[in-house]
Structure formats: structure tokens, C-alpha cells
Image (cartoon, rainbow, N blue to C red):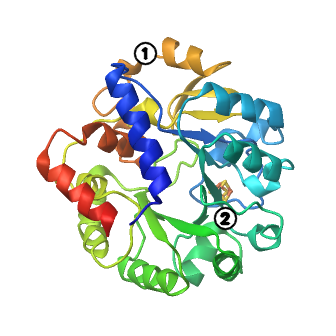
Amino acid sequence: MRFPLRLNYDLTRYIIRNKFSKTTRYPLVLMLEPTHLCNLACSGCGRIREYADTIQAMMSLEECLASVDECPAPVVTITGGEPFLYPHLNELVTAVLERGKHIYLCTNGILLENALATLPSHPNLTLNIHIDGLEETHDRILERRGAFKTAISAIIAAKRRGFRVCTNTTIFRETDLVEIDMLFSQLEEIGVDGILVAPGFGYEAVGEKLFMERQEIEKKFITVYEMSKKHRFFSTPMYLRFLKGEKALTCTPWGNPTRNPQGWKAPCYLITDNHYATFAEMMSRTDWDRYGVGRDTRCAQCMMHCGFEPTVVAEIGKSWRDILEMMIWNLT
Ligand code: SF4
Ligand code: SF4
């Protein structure tokens, strides 16, 4: 089975509960960014640029846990910045696990290996390591020589200690897909449990021509989709079919709400029009109909998982082909 039974059970129960209560807008994954501080300055990173003026700001442990408690999402992605620079990370992970939630802990892998000895190992915890190519490419994108070797060594060490590990690869305009295929084989050889893949988002703050437009994404993801037949992807087949232009999906911006030191970021993980003090305020005061492809020019080229994977979840059940495809995918 691709995902742990407990995660499948908790997510299914949560979705059914929302369907029964006729709740139309509910979050699936809380994106928690305790700090935007990072030990790297990757070429494609919107976060460290957008929040450059407040990069030293940090949420207290109490604020992080209050955010977890006010947002009903069963999955919490702890991200940033680099979460291993957050001084209360271990306490945060422990407390979120005690609340019965599932955690994806995102990292660039630089500090991971040294942190493994004290990080609580738990079946609900998945380490998610950012890898954008083989050694030369990855080090160039992360602008740090040795970043690839450090991350690979940390993955091997994490697997030895029994952690569940996945990786996260961004596909840019310049990405060589033959190299990515080789990378995925190498990651599987060292025991990675799953692979997430998505096109980069054209952050205004990055302002470089790294990112693809819709048609370019669709062309590149025809090949990436073929890779999903031989590598163990965590990205869903429906999302991958959307990325290659075969399936239409609209965005679900509230699916992955983001909380950071400035507040609840609206409307989504990618673009910012407001920060709100509470989750409830963000949900009620955001004019959701203003956002999405064809409604906001900033959304025009967006095909990011944070907006469209939640739509996949909402769409399941509408077509037998999708149900069957997702069942087979999850069971293999
Ligand atoms: S490691 Fe992540 S947060 Fe840090 S600069 Fe790179 S993309 Fe941004
Ligand atoms: S289309 Fe993308 S950028 Fe626009 S609201 Fe949705 S997730 Fe955000």
C-alpha cells in the first residue's frame, strides 16, 4: 500500500464527515511555517524573497500548536524556511503527533542527519526532502556545493533509523527529464518510500525565467507521467493527468491553508493578498471566487499541487474511472 493504513483511514473519515455535514470548504493539509529563516538561498524560492523583511520572525511553540488546534486538517506539513532552524521543532513534532495528526516534515536535508538522533520516530511522521536533480544540478539550484551529497547521506541515515522518507522535486523549464529519471532510480535504490513532483510556480518575487507556462508544463509532464509507471510516486495519478493536460481540474485554494509568523496567509500557499489573525477569519473573509485560473492573472500558469491535489480529493467519487485508478494506485 502506497500510504500507511492510518493515514488513509484518518483522511477518509475526515472527508466523509465533511461530506455528511455538507461542509463545502474544508482544509486537508495545514502548511505550517514556524519561520522563514533558511540556511540556503535557492534560485526558485519565493518564500525567502517574499518575506525578506521579516525573515528573522518566528512563531512561538504555543502559536504553532494553537494553529494546529484551530485548523481541522488531519495532515500538517511543517515547512518554512528550513524547519530544522526552528528551535522548538522536536517539541512541535511531538505535540502534533500527540494530537493524532500526520506530519510531513519538509527540509533541504542540510541539517537533517545530525537531527535524526533526537527527532521522534513515529509512523505518522514522514520526512520530505527537497531534491531537484542529480548532484551538479541540485547544487546549482540550491546554490550550495555539497547539498546533494549531504541530503543523500541524510536520507540513507533516516532510512536506517526507520523513518518514512519521501522526496520532493520541482520541475523547472531547464529541467532535463532523462536526468530526473536517473535521479528517481537512485532515490529508490537508497530506500525512499515515495516521490512527489510538481512544476515550479512563477513567484513574482523570484522574477526569473525559471518557470514554465501552462503549455510547457503539459508537454514536460507527458514524460513525467510515463515515469510514474515505473517509479513510486506520491503525486496522485489524477493530478499527473491534469499536469499533462488530459484532465481538467479547478483550484481549491483553501485545501492547503498556510500559517506563518505573519498570520494565516490568504488566499493560498503561493500568492498573498492578506494575513489574518485566525483560521476562521481567513476562511470567512476571503472572497474565494476571486481566485483560480481565468479569475486572477497570477493564477494563469499555476498547476501547483497545493491548489490542485485537494481538488483531486474533492473529485473522487464523481467518476468510476477515477475511483478505480486511485484504488489501484493506492494499493500498489
Ligand atoms: S531550502 Fe526551501 S526555504 Fe530554503 S531557500 Fe531553498 S526552497 Fe527556500
Ligand atoms: S490557482 Fe494557484 S495561485 Fe491561484 S489561488 Fe489556486 S493555488 Fe493559488
Mark 1: C-beta under 8 Å from nearest atom of ligand 2: no
Instruction: From the image, tell me which residue sits under label 2.
Output: 108
The C terminus sits in image quarter: bottom left
**Residue sitting nearer the eye, 222 or 105:** 105
- Position of 159 compared to 229: left or right? right
Instruction: From the image, tell me which residue sits under label 1.
Output: 287
Picture residue at 20% right of the left edge, 50% below the top: 323
Q: Residue 166 at x, y = what percent?
A: 53, 67
Picture residue at 58% right of the left edge, 43% below the top: 205
**Residue sitting nearer the eye, 252 or 295:** 252
In terms of image quadrants, where is residue 24? top left
Q: State whether residue 290 is above or below residue 174.
A: above
Q: Amino acid at mark 2?
A: Asn
Q: Amino acid at mark 1?
A: Asp
For the residues labelled 1 and 2, the Cα–Cα distance comes to 34 Å
Picture residue at 81% right of the left edge, 54% below the top: 85
Mark 2: C-beta under 8 Å from nearest atom of ligand 1: yes
Secondary element at image label 2: loop
Q: Earlier in the sequence, mark 1 or mark 2?
A: 2
**Which mark identifies residue 170?**
none
The image quadrant where one finds ligand 2 is top left
- Position of 2 compared to 148: left or right? left
